[in-house]
Image: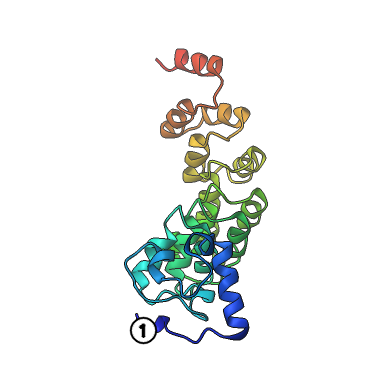
């Protein structure tokens, strides 16, 4: 853990104190330096946290960063890990529902690339499925993707996002009615508009029909009528 040792002087020290204060770490621990690595990251690391490493969210142990990136109790640390050099760590932050919306907005413009067969592991794709993602970010993501398969996977992730605005879900249905996997996502999304669910009940795919019938947003009388005709 020797990577944590660094001089704490000048503006670096002020930056360090500011980070601790914003994460509500300084108050319970007192204002005297040093704060221990384990007291911030929730592990047994006994090393002191010093700038510039803490200022950039760099824990020397990749596993510790991965675990923290998926934790829902460390929002302040997530802001730092969103700038991690490891794209897998940024992806975990992007999929974490505790990540602040503003940070998700930044991650929605992440430049990490992947092969077409691995698009599900990209940072932007993770943001698209995060229920904490702002509607404006989801709208932008629907138009992103360097290849056709990347665009499809992005729209599919947005269609399955439980906090996606109903208007956007309805628009996805009307723009891409030929995509079976997209229709399945829409059929199971509780935010899908009732009028869209009604159309999905008449889908050519029985799986889509059954999924739409089980959607809690479907009006009861509509479900009752559908059940009578499908006995």
In the picture provided, is 17 more to the left or to the right than 211?
right
107 left or right of 61? right
Q: Can residue 127 be seen in this snapshot?
A: yes
Q: Position of residue 91 (x, y in %)?
A: 47, 63
Of 130 and 148, which appears nearest the observer?
Answer: 130
Please say which color scheme the image uses: rainbow
The quarter of the rendered structure image containing the C terminus is top left
Residue drawn 47% across the image and 64% down it: 29
Question: Looking at this view, is 129 or 196 the one in front?
Answer: 129
Picture coordinates of residue 139 (x, y %)? 65, 52
Q: Residue at x 48, y 79 (%)?
A: 50
Q: Nearer the viewer, residue 46 or 27?
A: 27
Image location (x, y in percent) of residue 147: 54, 65
Q: Which residue is mark 1?
A: 2
Q: Is residue 192 above or below residue 3?
A: above
In the picture, which quadrant includes the N terminus? bottom left
Using a 10 Å C-alpha cutoff, classify the residue at mark 1 as few (fewer than 14 neighbours), some (14 to 19) or many (20 or more): few
Image coordinates of residue 59 in percent, x first then y, are: 41, 74
Q: Nearer the viewer, residue 220 or 196?
A: 220
Residue 144 in view, yes or no: no
Q: Is residue 79 left or right of residue 86?
A: right
- Residue drawn at (51%, 49%), measured in percent from left and top? 156
| Residue at x-position 38% and y-position 62% | 42
> Dividing the picture into quarters, in which one does residue 143 lie?
bottom right
Task: Determine the secondary structure under disc 1.
Answer: helix
Query: Number of marks in the image?
Result: 1
């Amino acid at each position: 853990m020797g990577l944590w040792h660094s001089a704490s002087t000048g503006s670096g020290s002020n930056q360090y104190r500011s980070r601790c204060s914003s994460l509500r770490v300084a108050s319970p621990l007192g204002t005297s330096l040093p704060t221990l690595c384990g007291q911030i990251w929730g592990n047994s690391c006994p090393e002191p946290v010093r700038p510039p490493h803490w200022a950039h969210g760099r824990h020397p142990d990749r596993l510790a960063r991965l675990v923290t990136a998926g934790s829902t109790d460390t929002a302040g640390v997530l802001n730092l890990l969103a700038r991690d050099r490891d794209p897998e760590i940024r992806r975990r932050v992007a999929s974490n529902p505790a990540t602040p919306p503003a940070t998700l907005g930044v991650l929605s413009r992440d430049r990490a690339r992947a092969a077409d067969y691995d698009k599900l592991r990209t940072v932007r794709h993770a943001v698209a499925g995060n229920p904490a993602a702002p509607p404006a970010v989801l709208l932008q993501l629907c138009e992103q993707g360097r290849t056709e398969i990347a665009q499809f996977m992005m729209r599919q992730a947005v269609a399955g996002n439980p906090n996606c605005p109903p208007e956007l879900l309805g628009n996805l249905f009307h723009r891409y009615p030929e995509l079976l996997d997209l229709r399945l996502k829409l059929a199971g999304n509780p935010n899908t508009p009732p009028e869209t669910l009604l159309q999905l009940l008449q889908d050519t795919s029985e799986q889509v029909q059954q999924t739409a019938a089980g959607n809690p947003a479907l009006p009861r009388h509509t479900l009752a009528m559908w059940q009578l005709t499908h006995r």
